[in-house]
Image (cartoon, grey):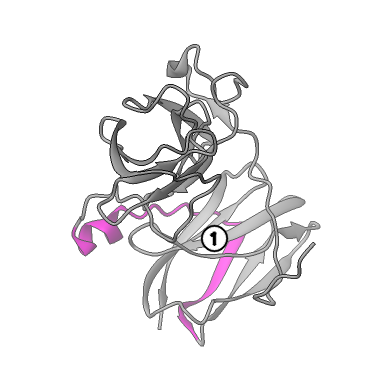
Amino acid sequence: CAPNPTGKKISVTNLGVVTDDPANKNISIHNSCTSFGGDMIADDDGNLYVFSARNQVFRINIETKVATHLGGIAGLPVNFTANGVAVAADNKVWISSAVDNSALYSVDMKNLAATLVAAGPWKSSDLANSNLLAVRKARPVAELLGSAEEIPNPKVQLYPNPVVNKQFAVRFTLPEGNYTVRMTDILGRQTMIQSVINIKGGQQTENIQLPATVQKGMYLVKVMDNTNKPVYSKKILVQ
């Protein structure tokens, strides 16, 4: 196994099992005939999109872990398998195949129609970039701040607020178990996720150090239990 070139410690959090939207009917995310292999992209609203090797597309809500079948991609050659996908500059999804190298295609996510981008040979088992699929509609900042949900819980205390020196503390008197502290900005984008905190009962205080990239402004801090259910949320002001 090659060493991590960034030098940063990598942690993996099990978010749970993905389930099917009841509307999926016979096209299940777990069906090995229609939904195996492929590649994934993400959007700017926190969803994942699975493109199966059989050219079926699913949207996965990270919070609920529900996969919704959006449909099959139209306009691809018979032997084309979706093996690499990436979001292009025009907000369409480029798609390549490791089996049919005749061409590279672009998929319009509004209707899942594929159009030719470039003739082959173009054989690829993976595509990747840092682009997110743009799906969010712009809303006034005041509306975004007002819509941020707060969940009070007398067994969780966050201080100080406003936050100074990019550090705050969370005091827990919650039942024993594993909890995660997350922070999102006013657009709902995740800016910080703390490693799993193991609460052993009684009173326990955890110090949270924000990343250096966090800017001044309003944020929403959530405490999630081991089922990914929020048990506390609070708006904070980072100074």
Horizontally, residue 239 falls left or right of residue 182, namely left
**Callout 1, which amino acid?**
Arg
Going by the picture, which residue comes out furthest to the top?
Answer: 26
Name the residue located 65 percent from the left edge and 39 percent from the top edge.
16
**Horizontal and vertical percent for residue 152?**
49, 54
Horizontally, residue 104 falls left or right of residue 207, namely left
Residue 62 visible in this rendered orientation of the protein: no
Q: Is residue 210 above or below residue 129?
A: below
Q: Nearer the viewer, residue 17 or 204?
A: 17
Quadrant containing the C terminus in the rendered view: bottom left
Q: Is residue 157 magenta?
A: yes
Q: Secondary structure at mark 1?
A: strand
Start and end of the magenta stretch? 140-164
Q: Which residue is mark 1?
A: 182
**Horizontal and vertical percent for residue 73?**
37, 27
**Horizontal and vertical percent for residue 145?**
29, 61
Name the residue located 38 percent from the left edge and 40 percent from the top edge.
103
**Horizontal and vertical percent for residue 188?**
38, 57
Name the residue located 64 percent from the left edge and 48 percent from the top edge.
225
Q: Nearer the viewer, residue 126 or 217?
A: 126
Q: Quadrant of residue 30?
A: top right
Residue 160 visible in this rendered orientation of the protein: yes
Tally the marks. 1
Going by the picture, which residue comes out furthest to the front?
Answer: 121
Horizontally, residue 91 falls left or right of residue 206, namely left
Q: Is residue 74 above or below residue 60?
A: above
Q: Nearer the viewer, residue 227 or 108?
A: 108
Q: Residues within 10 Å of mark 1 (few under 14, many from 20)?
A: some
Q: Is residue 152 magenta?
A: yes
Q: Quadrant of residue 95?
A: top left
Q: Is residue 55 above or below residue 208?
A: above
